[in-house]
Amino acid sequence: MFWCFHGLTTAFSNGVVFMKINTVQCWSRPCPMLSGELTIAVQANVCHAYQMVQSNGIPNDQVVVMMYDDIAYSEQNPHPGEIINEPGGPNVYPGVLKDYTGVDVSVANFLAVLRGDEAGVNKQTGGPVKVLRSDERDTVFIYLADHGSTGVFAFPREFLHASDLVDTINEMARCQKFSQMVIYMESCCSGSMMLHLPKNAQAYGVAASLPYESHCACFYDEDRLTFLAGEFTSCWLFHSQTSDLTQTTFQDQFVFLQQKITQSTPCQYGNNELSSLTISDVLGNSDPRTRASRFRGAETFQLTHLTPSSEVPLIIQRRRIQRESNPVKKEALQRDLDKLLQTRNAVKKAVHAIAKRACPEEAARVMADRRPLTRLADMKALVEHFSRTFSGWSQDQLADFGLLHMHVFVNLCESGVDIARIEEAITTVSSLTEFW
């Protein structure tokens, strides 16, 4: 995630922003706030967003970065210390702030930072506690990027729920923690996280996709064996770095996103009147020479290798198998792929069984429908019960494959099935499931 506010800029990254999670926060007065396989793209997104804001003149004392930070020097990175966000692009890792890394990238810390609640931060790795110090004079910009599904956004070991995000924004509004807020979110089903943004508060959100829609990774790098970015983030950063932001509004940028993004549907939420804000009033503005240099590549800017996020782990593993020449290592990689496929099928089978047990007369419809989420608290309770009960699967497995089926729990909730009955079905099916 990445947020800034005139007064302070903050960025978070998982690995939420930026999952694992990445977030950048910025604030300046009166101001805005910004908030593996796919993990590499997510962390690259966050690092790139930070570099843009920093080059636009937002000072570091107005920036908070939450980044899992496990890829720059990973043994699997053929270029130690280097993270790129586009083919042939610059290294966006050097100089990135690391206010929250590793185990400190948590939902509780993220929400505490937003609230400006130092006491609510549990920082295990040491170092100063940095939170959003905004007030009624500040504009806040939040940017989030990672795995997601209906009503949930993935952090390294848990999920941020739509109910908690909306409740925190409402609390910030009541406590006059901002004058205006802009939120950008890249994840599958990201619209479901902002569908209930208060329209009577000064909060405006842009989601990469509809509440029930997947989102795509892009720019597959054969050398690094991974995807470098997300479609939504690539487009909004490109537009921001090639436009005169003193003459560009958020509405102008949204129109650009609608035109350029082809694999999902960008959507606006909350108070759309704020889309008339000039972007430079929130994110600063690059100098003309930097903008001109970036603009020279505008005609050739084209997204490649667009791939649904849910397919990324499987595609990368298949590419590893194709490239491996050692028979023993190749066989081991194939076993890993087989396990991924078995886990995906097992998760799907388990969710189907839960639907049949909780609502046998409507199971087929519950599996197929894509109902809008209105019962946010009930959805949070079900997802948390599912995660605890199916703890035999890792958080990465749940993020890769469990998120594909969150709409089933939404449909059960919205069909009026008793929550206790759904939880009983989850518990029973878990007891019959073989984990591996």
Image (cartoon, grey):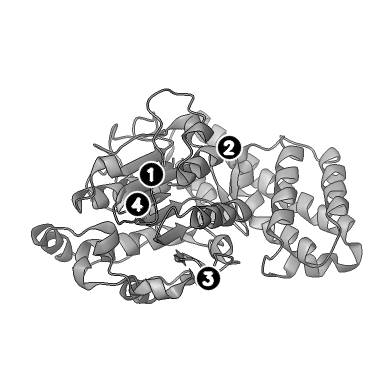
Q: Nearer the viewer, mark 4 or mark 3?
A: 3
Find disc 3 in the rendering and name its residue: 199
Residue 180 in sight: yes
User: Horizontal and vertical percent for residue 172?
Assistant: 50, 53
Q: Quadrant of residue 410?
A: bottom right
Q: Nearer the viewer, mark 4 or mark 2?
A: 4
Amino acid at dot 2: Arg
Measured in 3D between alpha carbons, the distance from the residue under mark 1 to the one under mark 3, in whole angstroms, is: 24 Å
User: Is disc 3 surrounded by few (<14), some (14 to 19) or many (20+) residues within 10 Å?
Assistant: few
**Which disc is residue 4 wearing?**
4
User: Is disc 4 surrounded by few (<14), some (14 to 19) or many (20+) residues within 10 Å?
Assistant: many
Measured in 3D between alpha carbons, the distance from the residue under mark 3 to the one under mark 2, in whole angstroms, is: 31 Å
Query: In this view of the protein, which residue sits in the foreground, 368 or 135?
Result: 135
Secondary structure found at label 1: loop
Q: Nearer the viewer, mark 3 or mark 2?
A: 3
User: Is disc 2 surrounded by few (<14), some (14 to 19) or many (20+) residues within 10 Å?
Assistant: some
Q: Nearer the viewer, mark 4 or mark 1?
A: 1
